[in-house]
Structure formats: structure tokens, C-alpha cells
Image: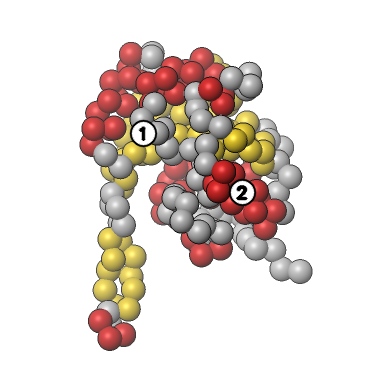
């Protein structure tokens, strides 16, 4: 039986994930997010606001000796994470059904953390993540709004993150033009990808 994804590179096409109406991190954003996480095979990654689990699945495929904890508050999202995990044959992806930061209380530590959604509770979540991260940990935060970007940068500084890097991603996909004639570009929503650690090191 052919595996759903039998390549070693990240960038699983969006169409291979079960999604329904649950938000999903697009392929292009996912690839850059994973690259900014600076993963090692044994790491424990916590994915907050995991949605369909697209980042969690890709990370779990990379973390051969490690594990991924997906945190998702919506029951439909939790169901989809489970279905996507099984579809990709994963045994190192586990889900916590609950809202952060309370849902993080059962965790003792994390090597890497990615925040895809905060439901308006970013200050509390970042504070808990700061305490949860190991000394050489890395946190990556994806945001769409300028207001979230501004507040995130301020909060990271207040929490003692000394190596903060920002990437503004804007890209477009080719699709058939009107009437199927030619090719036109369909832009994706611009995304800000913030990576941060507590060592004096650049993640660029």
C-alpha cells in the first residue's frame, strides 16, 4: 500500500489533509514554519491551536525519535487531527483537547513550540510557553493581523526572549485563468512568522 507521503522533504500538499471547515496552515507557510523551528530528531514539539494538525503531522514525520503534542480546543479539530494522524500512519502524535494556556498544565517541558492560534489569550499563552520551554528552546508564532504582530513582539521582549526574528510571507499560487484560458496568480493571505529563543542567536 502506497504511503500518503513517502518523501523526506516537508511541504505536503494541502489536498492530502482532511480539513472540512477547520482552519489549516497552508503548505507554503507550513514549510517555512518548520524550517524556523530548527527541529532535531529527538525533540518534543507542542503545537498550540493545531487546527487540522497539518503542522503536527509534518513535524511528527520529521521527529523520528521525538514526539508532537497537538493542542486544540475545538472537538472537530481534535477529530481531524486524529484522522490525519492515522492517515499518515503516525504513532508519535498525541492530542490534548482543551484551550491554552490551561491545556498546557499537564506538560512538563517542550523543546519547540509553535503557536498557530490563541483565541485572544496570547499574553497568558506566551507566559506559559516561556516557562515550559527548555533552555535552548525555540518558539515560532504565526499571525495574520498587524495588531497581533505588534503585541507579540512586545510580549516576547518582556518575557526575556533575546533572539527574535521576523519574516513577512506573501506568496501566490498559479491557477487556471477565466474560462480555463492561461494561468493567473491567486494570492494567499500574507502571514507574519516570528521565531524566538532565549539564547543570543539569529534564527534567520
Occupied quadrant, residue 121: top left
Q: Position of residue 82 (x, y in %)?
A: 65, 48
Question: At 47% from the left edge and 51% from the top edge, which residue is drawn?
Answer: 22
Question: At 62% from the left edge and 54% from the top edge, which residue is drawn?
Answer: 84
Whether residue 44 is situated above or below residue 26 in the rendered picture = above
Q: Is residue 202 left or right of residue 151?
A: right
Question: At 32% from the left edge and 26% from the top edge, which residue is drawn?
Answer: 152
The residue under label 1 is 194
The mark that comes first in sequence, 2 or 1, is: 2
Element assignment for label 1: strand
Taking depth in this image into account, of 91 and 33 the one nearest to the observer is: 91
Question: At 34% from the left edge and 39% from the top edge, which residue is drawn?
Answer: 143
Image quadrant occupied by the N terminus = bottom right
Q: Mark 2 against mark 1, which lies toward the viewer?
A: 2
Residue 144, disc: none
Element assignment for label 2: helix
Disc 2: CA contacts within 10 A as few (<14), some (14-19) or many (>=20): some
Amino acid at each position: 500500500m502506497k504511503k500518503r507521503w513517502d518523501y523526506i522533504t516537508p511541504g505536503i500538499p494541502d489536498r492530502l489533509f482532511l480539513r472540512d471547515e477547520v482552519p489549516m496552515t497552508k503548505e507554503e507557510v507550513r514549510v517555512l514554519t518548520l524550517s524556523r523551528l530548527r527541529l532535531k530528531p529527538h525533540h518534543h514539539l507542542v503545537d498550540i491551536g493545531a487546527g487540522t494538525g497539518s503542522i503536527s503531522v509534518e513535524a511528527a514525520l520529521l521527529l523520528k525519535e521525538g514526539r508532537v503534542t497537538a493542542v486544540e480546543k475545538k472537538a472537530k479539530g481534535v477529530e481531524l487531527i486524529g484522522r490525519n494522524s492515522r492517515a499518515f500512519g503516525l504513532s508519535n502524535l498525541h492530542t490534548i483537547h482543551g484551550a491554552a494556556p490551561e491545556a498546557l498544565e499537564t506538560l512538563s517541558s517542550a523543546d519547540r513550540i509553535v503557536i498557530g492560534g490563541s483565541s485572544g489569550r496570547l499574553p497568558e499563552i506566551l507566559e506559559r510557553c516561556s516557562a515550559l520551554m527548555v533552555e535552548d528552546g525555540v518558539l515560532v508564532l504565526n499571525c495574520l493581523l498587524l495588531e497581533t504582530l505588534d503585541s507579540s513582539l512586545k510580549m516576547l521582549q518582556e518575557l526575556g526572549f533575546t533572539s527574535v526574528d521576523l519574516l513577512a510571507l506573501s506568496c501566490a499560487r498559479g491557477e487556471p485563468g477565466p474560462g480555463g484560458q492561461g494561468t493567473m496568480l491567486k494570492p494567499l493571505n500574507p502571514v507574519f512568522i516570528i521565531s524566538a529563543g532565549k539564547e543570543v542567536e539569529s534564527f534567520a
